[in-house]
Each structure stands twice: as structure tokens, then as C-alpha cells.
Image: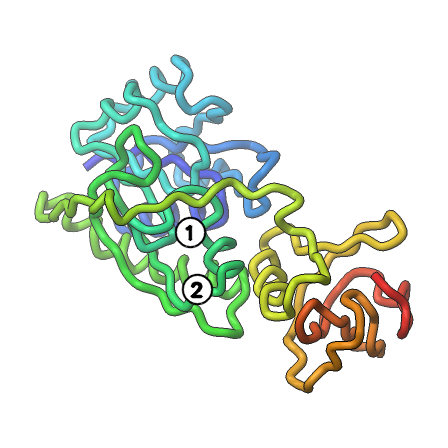
Amino acid sequence: MKILFIGAVQFSKHALILTIQSRADVVGVCTLSESLFNSDHCDLSSVAESYEIPVHYAKNINSSETVNWINDKEPDIIFCFGWSRLLKREILNIAPMGVVGFHPALLPQNRGRHPIIWALVLGLSETGSTFFFMDEGADSGDILSQEKITILPDDNAGSLYQKVTDTALVQIKEFIPMLKAGDFERLKQNHSKSNYWRKRGIDDGKIDWRMNAEALHNLVRALSKPYVGAHFSFKGKIFKVWESSIVEEKISINIEPGKILQKSSSRMIIKCGTGALSLLSFEDSNYFSEGIYL
């Protein structure tokens, strides 16, 4: 079974290495040398070249140049793990077995953009790892493999990313032999139960101290590394926050949101719309003092 691999994020790298080590015949790799929007971007060329696998930089995955390059490799199946652009019919039709995609959510729920971030922002208690046969829609094709993943209160983007990666790699190891043998099932999605998460923008990462402490804590953990970090502005300067906790002590309702209640070398406590948030890791901590308003 000849596999053409498409990917350009950190997860893609782990998946490609496992696919190769599973003695699969990877005949080509499409990747990106850089990305303007994926903070977890990863150029797969070094992995591919170390195994003497041909590489194609696909700035436009649906261009005639890329379609022809993939066609020349004559893949039986295409793996597309970690690619932010939809594939058009010209690529979906190349491989006889189709294209297997990946989405870190419990499809058909939560299709669309930034699934790890939105799951944490919304305070979900579980998500998933889903491999599916791609069609021209967004995350709407038949499911090949799916596993649930528990989100713990202390999970952040980094720990959840690792959970998703660990789960997905086990799935890949299991379904590659099934694909080779033709012994697999395709489960159609119930589209009536689907929803789509939108693309996030810069403003979605802005800390508004009028929000309650729990919502702000979820925002901070959702945007922690490998992502861009939640942020707030003060006197025209932007400050990134990487770690926080919710203050358990009762806070007076007579204090306005945004006031620094306590400042030490290790943390800064800010009054929120409801409750207070303790910032445990943030930029330029020496810039602030108790009593001022953000």
C-alpha cells in the first residue's frame, strides 16, 4: 500500500515518523517550509529526506503543480494529518482508497477550526481524536477511527495537544494494518448533530477583566504553548499570559474589575467581573504594582 503524506504541524511530524516506522511505503510528502498562521508549524522535509522520501512544498495544495506531483507518485491512499486548507476533488480522487484526514474532536460535533483551543475556552470535559475519509466538506466524511479524550481541569493547550497526539498515534498504528488488509469499516457521520467552530482572531485571545475568573482561566490555558498566549494591554503595550489559576478565596464585589489586588515575585492577582485570577506566568512581571488598574 503506497501512501502519500500531507502535513505541516508538530503532530504531522510524529504521525509521519510512526507511519514510516510501521513499514508503510510512503512514496512522497507534501509540506510547507513556513506558515503565517500555525504556531505549531513543522516542516516535514528533514524527516522525509532522512528516509529518502521525495518532498514537495505545496504552497497551494490544490494547484495543478501539486496535483500532478501527487499523481506521479501513484499512491493507493493519501494521509492528510495537520493541514489547514480543504482539499478539492482533483486531489480527493487521485488515490483509489481515498484520503484519510484527522480532526482532534468527537465528530460530527465540533468540526472546523482550532478544535483544541475552543474545547478549552468553552470548558469542555472531553474531546476526541478522529480519523475520517475526507470529502469536499469540512470534517464531514465517513469515520475510520475515533477515540474519546478526557479534559482535566488542570489541562492546558500543551497537555491536551500531547494527549491528542498520544491517542492518535495509537490509532494510526492500529488502522494501518487494517487498511493494508482491506479490513476496516466506514461509519457515516450524523450530520444533524454537527456544529462548526469558527476561525479565531487576535481579539479572541484578549483578556477582558470584566469576564468572570473561570472564563479567563479557560482562555489562558487554551492559548498556552504551543499556541500564541492570551494577552491584555496596559498603557499601549501588549502582555502575554501563559499560566493562571482561579483564586478560591471570596473576593469583595465592591472592587472594580482589572484592579491588581496582590503582586509578588511569583504571581499577580487581578479582580475579575466575578472572582479573581492569579497570573502565575506572564511577561514583564516587574512592570506592575499593587493597586493599579489594568
- Provide residue 241's location: percent of width, then percent of height: 71, 61
Q: Is residue 38 left or right of residue 58?
A: right
Q: Quarter holding the N terminus?
A: top left
Q: Which mark is residue 124?
A: 2
Residue at the far bottom in the pictured view: 249
Residue at the far top in the pictured view: 64
Q: CA distance from mark 2 to mark 1?
A: 26 Å
- Provide residue 61's location: percent of width, then percent of height: 42, 24
- What amino acid type is highlighted by mark number 1? His
* For residue 210, above or below residue 289: above
State the image quarter where residue 102 is shown: top left
State the image quarter where residue 208 is shown: bottom right
33, 55: nearer the viewer: 33
* For residue 9, above or below residue 230: above
Is label 2 in contact with label 1 (beta carbons under 8 Å)?
Answer: no
- What amino acid type is highlighted by mark number 2? Leu
Residue at the location (26% across, 44% down)? Answer: 132
Q: Which mark is residue 14?
A: 1
